[in-house]
Every structure is written in C-alpha cells, then in structure tokens.
Amino acid sequence: WTLQPPRRRPRRRRWSGSGRACACTTTRRSTRPGAAPRGSTRCSCSTRGTSARTRPRPPRAPRAPGSRASASSSRASATWTPASAASAHASSSCAPATTSRTPSAQPSRTYWNIGKLCFESDTEPYALARDKRVTDFAAASGIEVFSPVSHTLFDPAEIIEKFLFSSANLKNGGRPPLTYQSFVATAGEPPKPVMEKYSELPPIGDTGGYELLPVPKLEELGYGDLSQEYIPPFRGGETEALKRMRESLQDKEWVAKFEKPKGDPSAFLKPATTVLSPYLKFGCLSARYFYHCIQDVYRSTKTHTKPPVSLAGQLLWRDFFYTVSFGTPNFHQMEGNKICKQIPWRENGELFVAWRDGRTGYPWIDAIMIQLRKWGWMHHLARHSVACFLTRGDLYIHWEQGRDVFERLLIDSDWAINNGNWLWLSCSSFFYQYHRIYSPISFGKKYDPNGDYIRHFIPVLKDMPKEYIYEPWTAPLSVQEKARCIVGKDYPKPVVDHEAASKECRKRMEEAYASNRLGGNPVKGNSSNSSRRKFSDGGQDVPDSSMSKQPRKRS
C-alpha cells in the first residue's frame, strides 16, 4: 500500500445526510462536505476552509447488500489505505467524525496515528525527486516531516553555500568546490555524532488489520540458489560494522601510518583496507562516529598521516564527491555535465563484453573483474586498474558503461562516489594526466610477483609458472601444455596489444583535450545509451582494427 491517494475517484454521489462534521460542532443534521452544519458555527480546527476536493474522505462503514450506495461505497473502500486515512487526520486539532445514513453503521477509525514522518536526507537526484513528492503529500495531509542530513560528515548544501560566498570561489564560476583541498578548507571539522541514548517510539496505534511483515529472506527475493563462491565474504548489519571498525582501530600503529595509495590491491585473504565502505553505504555505520573514533586514535599516537592519504582523509574524500555531485547537474553523465570533458569515446560491444566478463586475456584485469562478480568488492587500486584499462588506457570505451557495471555489482556502490571515481579515472574531470596509465602487466606484478591473486580467481592459470602468469601468451607451447592451459583454448588471447592500444589512446585523448581547450564540442549525441541497448539485446559492434592488434609474442 502507498501513501499516495488514489488517482481514480469513485463516482460522485449527492450527499444527503452523511456529511463530514467535526466533534467540536453541534449539529441537527449533516450537510454537504465543507459546509457548516445547521445550528452550529464553523470550528477553528485544521479542517476549516478546506473542501471535499482537497480533504481526504474517511472510509465509510460497510453497508448491507442491496443498499442504494453499496456499489460506490465498495469502490471507494477498495482504494482507501490506512496511510491515507491516517494522513487525513494526523494534524487535526479536533477528532474528525462521520455520521451514518443508517443507525447500524459503525463509525470509521483512524489508523496508525501518523503525526510525524522521519527519514534520512538523500542527495541523489532520484531520491530528491522522490522525497519531494512524499514531503508535499505529507504537508498537504498535515504530517510533520523531519529529514536530517546524517549519511555524510557534512551537509552538502551548507558546504556549497559556504563556498559560494568565500573568497576562494571568485574564480570558480559559482560552482561547488572542485578540488579536495578547497573542499577541506571550506568544510572544517565535522560535527560529532548524536548521543547513544535512545528514546522509545510511541505505539503505532490501530493497524486496521494490516499485518506487520518481517524483513524478507534472501530466498524470498530470488537469491536462494547462489553458490557459496558468489556470496560476498562480508557479513552485513550494524553489529558486524561496529565489530569490523573496532578490530581495525585496535591496531593504532596501522591507523597512524595508513596511506591509501600504498595499499596492496592483491591482498584478498586479508584486505589491506578496513572494508567498511559497504557499511557506510547502507547506513550500518555512521560516518561521523567512524571519523571521531579515528580522531581518538590519532590523539593517542605521536604522529599520524594527514589527508588526503590518511584513514580519516578517506571519509573526507567521500564527502567531497557527495558535495560535488549535489551541486553539479548531470553529474552522472558526460552530456550536459559542465565539469566533464567532452570526449568522443568509441563503442565496441565485443571489447566491452570481454572486459565485463573477465575475458580480456590479461590475467590481472580478468582476476579483478572475476573478484568483482563473485565478491562484489575489490581494492580501490584494483578498481583503478580495470577502469583505466576500459577507458583511456587500452579500450577507449565510454566510462558510463563501466560505471553501470560497477553500480550493478559492487556491494558498496554509491551514486556520488562511483560516478566521481569514473570521472576521475577516465580523466574526464578532477584528474587530467591522461598519459599516466596503469599497466595491465607490471602494476599487478609489483604487488604480487608470484601471482597468487590470479591463481585464486582464475583457477585455469594456477599451474602457470610465475614467469608467465601475467603474460601467459608469451609462454612456450610446452609450458602451456604442462600447465594444462593453452592460450586461445583454455584461456583467451589478449583482446588488444597493450603497447599499441595505449599509444593510440594517448593520441585520442590529446586530440579531445585540444578540442575542449579551443571551446569545441567533439561529441554530438555520443552517449552510452545506444550501447546499453545493444548489450541488452545481445548485439555487438565490429571491433576497431586500429586497437585490436594482438600483442607481440616475446622470444
């Protein structure tokens, strides 16, 4: 059932003796809705001055079969909900009452006793539109709405307003802070979390016979047949979030020396980070509480790292993207996004599907995508590798397509952070050194020379010697046969030659940047929407021959 009133109203009938009155009036007989009863004066309650068109009508009492208005009464009661009934009476200063046409009819009741609606503020565009509809309906029904900002360290609207009137914004064109440093300078110190003493909610009142349902189980949602390897190894809930946070903060030396760029993306048995992002995303852990717990650890140590690389700095990164996304129209796309470089990304369904499914022929890239599909999570440097490979590094495919894959598979997928990172890693915004590319070979080898990460997520390569684990196509045929993994049969060949593809990507990025500097717009209607339709229909584009050359086999 829904809070919204029914769109189709029952056929209007002439009211003759069953009008709506207030308990504070004395009446000899009822009149039409909205008119003062005879022998009484109009009351000063919230129903004064309203009409039947704007004031919801309470449910009528059941009628005996064959009565004159039984058909219309049944239609009206079929569309009435407890929520709308409660909304109609929640703010009235005097109890509404109904008069019946027959002495045997029972008076209607008010369900749920709704007088105040509380929900957490959400800055995503779809949520803002949804919450506005709910707030407008609640206001029209006399229900008080309380929607605090508690999902982030700061209120994005307050940060933007503060930044707009600061001297640092004179050159920013009235936009939100677009650099991490300007955001931190504007934000200041986050407020402390609320006290841990909880108040009790009042009784919900008469439920009108509606059953209060428990939280559905995974089997009821269609996830009962998943194998164990496709279930994330991270248990959800607030209890688990607090436990994981306390275990991480117990190692004070690790917290004090934490530097995000120095993490190990290949560490999967014991991740190199806190893995608290899913709990922050779902509200299982308060960002403010986590931030101030980190500050408590800092105060107990002599020295500690500073933002943006510190552990507390990661929470500030989160709020930075929330603030920029809140103040930037069309933040989630290239078209109409003023802070996004207009780059003519190409469409190539075959290469995109290979990247999405972990079949690029580059074990480091494929292992990351397989971990994403099985666990719903991977280290942030691993995300950097596959995002760069898809966009400006090798395949030159639109970042919006990769964003959609992450949004669907990541358990910590957050609209603001996901879009912000893809804008960053594709060099479309925030970061513009497009010549710096993550190698799909040497980057992973730096952290895991033996290839244990690859062997775990790609079992077909588990017996490949470490000399060839990152480049199995360079292994002699005898080595491949001994490892029981023939490239091109058991494991795919590389979809592109990294050296040639990255060189071509740099050239295209340079041309796109030059066009943007000159004020041109090289993109006309170039969007990933058409690609999404092709992928959903099973269609694929013809690969670009200039970027699909096979890598040279080493001697």
Image (cartoon, rainbow, N blue to C red):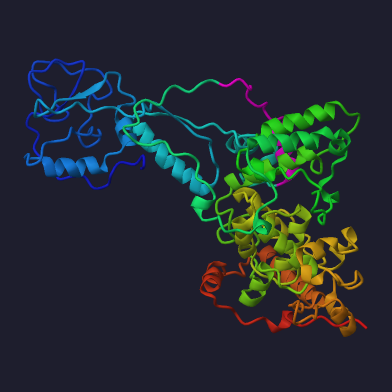
- Magenta stretch, main secondary structure class: loop
Q: Quadrant of residue 309?
A: top right
- Front-most of 54 and 385? 385
Can residue 180 be found in the magenta stretch? Answer: yes
Q: Residue at x 10, y 27 (%)?
A: 31
The picture places residue 364, in percent across and down from the top left corner, at 79, 66
- Front-most of 200 and 163? 200
Does residue 514 lie above or below 58 as drawn? Answer: below
Q: Residue at x 77, y 62 (%)?
A: 385
- Front-most of 547 and 8? 8
Does residue 201 lie above or below 334 as drawn? Answer: above
Can residue 543 be found in the magenta stretch? Answer: no
Q: Quadrant of residue 278?
A: top right
Image quarter where the C terminus lies is bottom right
The picture places residue 46, in percent across and down from the top left corner, at 28, 23
Q: Which residues are magenta?
A: 179-198
Image quarter where the N terminus lies is top left
- Front-most of 163 and 204? 204
